[in-house]
Image: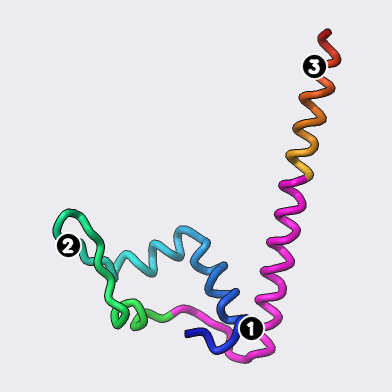
């Protein structure tokens, strides 16, 4: 369990990266009957993940990741807006 919310944020962004999730989970997976996947809590928690050494470092990294995600969301919203504007302008251009 994360010591604080900042570690939780870092873990969230770490596992959002498909390659990190795959590399962490692949050695732990045991296929069961009917192609079910079994991962025990003990095996899941044995693996290690690189984490910041100090709380201040964790806070800085978490806040940076959150800021970057907010910026990405803003850019995606702007892109959708520009795409709508483009469609509108093209439709008016060829009337």
Query: Horizontal placement of 21 versus 95: left or right?
Result: left
- In space, the residues marked 3 and 2 are separated at their CA atoms by 55 Å
Q: Residue at horizontal 29%, vertical 79%?
A: 43
How are the residues colored? rainbow
- In space, the residues marked 3 and 1 are separated at their CA atoms by 50 Å
Q: Which mark is residue 91?
A: 3
Q: Residue at horizontal 16%, vertical 54%?
A: 34
Query: Horizontal placement of 15 versus 4: left or right?
Result: left
Residue placed furthest toward the left: 33
- In space, the residues marked 1 and 2 are separated at their CA atoms by 37 Å
Which sits earlier in the primary sequence, circle 3 or circle 2? 2
For residue 38, above or below residue 34: below
Determine if the magenta segment contains residue 83.
no
Q: Residue 43 versus residue 27: which sits nearer the camera?
A: 43
State the SS at label 3.
Answer: helix
Question: Which residue, given by chain and number where applicable, does mark 1 sit on?
Answer: 58
For residue 61, above or below residue 4: above
Q: Quadrant of residue 55?
A: bottom right
Labelled pair 1, 2 in contact (Cβ < 8 Å): no
Q: Which mark is residue 32?
A: 2
For residue 31, above or below residue 56: above
Q: Residue at horizontal 75%, vertical 46%?
A: 77
State the SS at label 1.
Answer: helix
Q: Quadrant of residue 13?
A: bottom right
Q: Which residues are magenta?
A: 49-77
Determine if the magenta segment contains residue 64.
yes
């Amino acid at each position: 369990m994360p010591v604080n919310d900042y570690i939780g944020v870092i873990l969230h962004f770490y596992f959002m990266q498909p390659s990190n999730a795959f590399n962490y989970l692949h050695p732990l997976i045991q296929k069961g009957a009917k192609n079910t996947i079994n991962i025990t809590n003990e095996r899941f928690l044995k693996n290690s993940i690189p984490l910041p050494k100090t709380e201040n470092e964790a806070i800085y990294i978490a806040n940076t990741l959150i800021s970057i995600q907010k910026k990405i969301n803003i850019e995606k919203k702007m892109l959708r807006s520009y795409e709508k504007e483009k469609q509108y302008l093209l439709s008016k251009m060829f009337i």
